[in-house]
Image (cartoon, grey):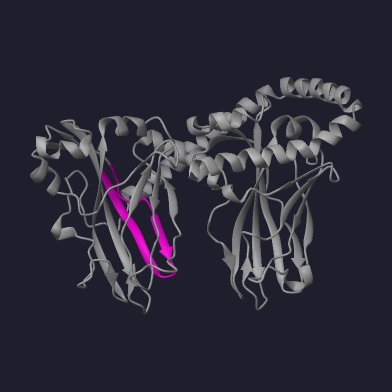
Amino acid sequence: MKKAATILAILFTILLLTACGTEKDDDEAKETSDTAESTEADSNLEATSEDENNDEDEMNEQDQEEEVNESEDQQNGESSTSFKEGEVWNNELPETTEADVEVVYENMDPGYENDLSGFIIKVNAYQIVKLTGIDNDNQTYFGDQSEGYAVSFDTTIHNTTDKDLYYNPRLTIQLADQFDIITSSPSIYRNDEYSLAPPSDDVSLYPSNTEVNGLYTLQLTTEEYNKLQEVNAKLIIEGGVADNKQYEGSDQKNETYDFIHSNGSAMASAHSSEYYQDKIMEDNIAEKTMIYESNEEKTGTIGEDVKVTLKGVQYAELTPTASYEEAFAEIGDSGVVALTMKLEIENASDKELDVKFARTFLSIDNNQLRGQSDESLSPSDPSSVMPGETKEILKVFLLPADGVKQIYDTYKLEFGPFYGQDGKGLFKDASMELEIPSPKTDS
């Protein structure tokens, strides 16, 4: 159901923009010849700039290599883990499975963390091992095979708040996309010496101001491990912390990171970090190829006490992953461009601002095309900005690629009003408009 809803949302957004553009196509037949001339000119420009682009590609590759080297230097430096490199961390694996265990990869300082308003889950380090000769009783965890892999995460759970909080630890590896995941109970191959269980009678109740350190282990079949090498895998530190045993009103914020499992994946991660981490990136909906980006800042206000700053924009052409190929095929041969905007919201008012449902429209070429942001592609956090807070959000619009490359000239963001819990517009329905940098206006 979730997959179908996401695909339908993508189709609806694109079809909305395409429908809005139909009138323009009918009323401006002359545009076709103008576009052809523009395309020819663009081709000449591309030819003359080929050498320059090659130089830029070489520089980008060098930059990525430097980022990977910096990451490796950090890993070789001081780490927060107490485990030693090269030694098998979870001795339950060889003892329980009776398999030979070989270390194949370690990340000693990944920087993975989920801070749930002071309840912090942190991955200090992790180790990938290969198991050979798994006994019959344990093969069920490895695809009924005698060979498989496991990832042991050195994890710290720290409740820094003054409340006793309920939480069930859950780490997930996402493979091709959000529908292709690896998960496991933390009780499987649990090392009692390194348990994540809290110091309480309830296995999910973490008392205030307590810290627990232990191992969380995921099992992978050989097929899943091989797939890691082919996709942009993610590690998800799941939320779900609550102040009651029924988990009512729980904080469901997840944190998603590139899951580094080899030197090659470290290079890929350095590349993907160039892009704003919207749901297209987090859920592996598509691969991005940058068309244009700008860090030019522009500021507007909503009412007297809310300041909105455009921090940057990225236009990226999308190549859908396997699960989304059919949905994108319905759009046509032109392809799709994602326009992702980074906005900073400074709330000096006394109202909570719901940023997920604030009215957000994109006007192209003086309302020749109009479209609403696709909230299914924006990160779920933050969903609101409290009084006195300043937070960054991402807004995503899907556009026909041929329009972005050949036709559209000007882009305008219409943002606001915000809405209260009663559904009424705040600050007397105040809104704002900002001109958005685009490939043509900046050329």
Q: Residue at x 54, y 36 (%)?
A: 286
The foreground one among 173 and 344 is: 173
Specify whether residue 315 is in view: no
Tell me residue 166's x, y (percent): 33, 69
The reply to whether the magenta stretch includes residue 108 is: yes
Report the residue that reaches farthest toward the front.
1
On screen, residue 25 versus residue 60, left or right, reads right
Residue beneath the point at 67% across and 22% down: 50
Q: How many marks?
A: 0
Instruction: Tell me if residue 217 is in the magenta stretch.
Output: no
Which residue is at the front of the view, 109 or 436?
436
Image coordinates for residue 84, horizontal then vertical, percent: 20, 50
The image shows residue 351, relative to residue 42, as above or below, that is below
When the figure is inspected, residue 260 is found, relative to residue 425, above or below; the finding is: above
Check the picture and name the quadrant holding the C terminus. Answer: top right
Q: Main secondary structure of the magenta part?
A: strand
Q: Which residues are magenta?
A: 106-129
Q: Is residue 239 above or below residue 276?
A: below
